[in-house]
Image: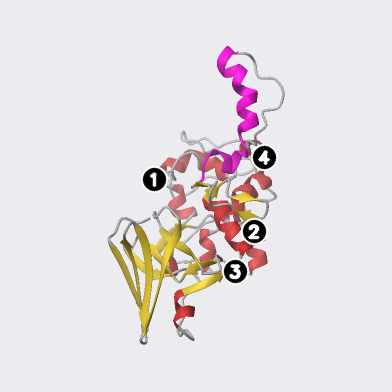
Amino acid sequence: MHGLPKLTFQAGPYHYEIFREDMKNVYRISGEGNSLEAMLTWAFGTGRVGQSYLFRAPDDSYREAKVTYFSSIHNLGFTPARAFAHAKDIEEAMYRPVTKTEAGRCFACHATASMVGNEVEENGLFPGVTCEACHGPGARHVAAMAPTMLEGAPVTGPEYILNPASLEPLDSVDFCGACHVSSRDVALSGTKGIVNARSQPYRLELSKCWGAGDARLRCMSCHDPHQEVDPVAENYDHVCASCHMTGSGTRSATVHEKPCPVGTSGCVNCHMPKVFLPEIHSTFTDHKIRVSHAGEGYVE
C-alpha cells in the first residue's frame, strides 16, 4: 500500500481515515455521532496513479471502500464513480457491496492465478501481473522447453503457452482490452464522456487510421508489456514515422503516407493529446489518434 503514515478525507459530515495499526491497514469513517471501522485486505493499483481498496464483510463477501488514494494529491478522494452528495447512513457512505463476479474481474486483472472455477482463491494467487497473466499456465511450457535449456536441443512440438504478439490486430487490441477496457466493454456499460480517455484500447479503435485493424497499429506497437510505460513523447516518434514519414524526410510506402506539416518530433503531444480526468485527479493520454487543435478538448 501507499507509504504515507495516515490518509484523511472529508465529505459532508463524514470523516475518512486510513492508517497502519498493529501491522494492519485500518479504514475508519466517523460522522453524525457514529463510527465504523474495517481492516483493508486488498489494494488494487501500484499507486502510480492511485489505489482502491476491498475489505471483507462479516458474511465474508467483499466491500469496496468509498475512498481511494490518489498519488497526485498524496491523499484520499472519492473512489471513481462513487462520489455522493448525500448518503442515507454511515454504511452507505463507507462502502459499496461487491458481487463475486465483479470481485473476480478485479482480481483477474490485478493478480495472477486468482481464480479457481468461478471463485476467487486468495491463498494461491500472485499479487500483480506476472508472466502467466498474459501467457497462461506455464508448467507444461517449462517441461517442453527443458531439453532445449539443458541440452541445446531444437524446439519441437507445441510450446503450450499463448504468445499475444502472434494475435491478429483486432484480437491483439481486444486482448489488452480485457483489462484496459475494450469497445465491447464501453458499449455494454454505456459509459460516455471524458472518463473513457483511460480506456486506451477502445479509444485506439476509434482512430481514423485504425480502419478495420492494422497490424502496425496495436498496443504492442508502442508499448512493451514487460516494461513500464515510457513517459517521453519523442521516444514514440519512430512508431509514428513507420506509417507516415521516415526520419530522413522520405515518405513510407504505405496507405498512411501523408506527413505532418507541423513537426517531426513529439508526434503524440499533438495527435494523442493528454486530458485531465477530475475524478481520478490525474492526466491520461487519449489514444484516439487524430489531428488535435489547441483548446479543442476531449472529442467523443
Which labelled disc corresponds to residue 191? Answer: 3
Q: What range of the chain is rendered magenta?
A: 128-152
> Residue 139: within the magenta?
yes
Q: Nearer the viewer, mark 1 or mark 3?
A: 3
Question: Dot 2 corresponds to which residue?
Answer: 183
Mark 1 or 3 closer to N-term? 3
Question: Label 2 neighbourhood size at 10 Å, few (<14), some (14-19), many (20+)?
Answer: some
Please tell me in which quadrant of the rendered image residue 157 appears. Answer: top right
176 lies above or below 106: above
Residue 130: x and y, percent? Answer: 52, 41
Left or right of 196 in this view: 262 = left
Q: Amino acid at mark 1?
A: Val
Question: Dot 4 corresponds to which residue?
Answer: 167
180 lies above or below 90: above
Nearer-the-camera pick, 47 or 280: 47
Nearer-the-camera pick, 38 or 146: 38
Residue at 55% in and 41% down: 221
Residue 230: x and y, percent? Answer: 42, 44
Distance from disc 4 to disc 3, alpha carbons, whole Å, reads: 27 Å
Question: Label 4 neighbourhood size at 10 Å, few (<14), some (14-19), many (20+)?
Answer: some
Mark 4 or 3 closer to N-term? 4
Q: Amino acid at mark 4?
A: Leu
Q: Residue furthest left?
A: 5
Q: Amino acid at mark 3?
A: Thr
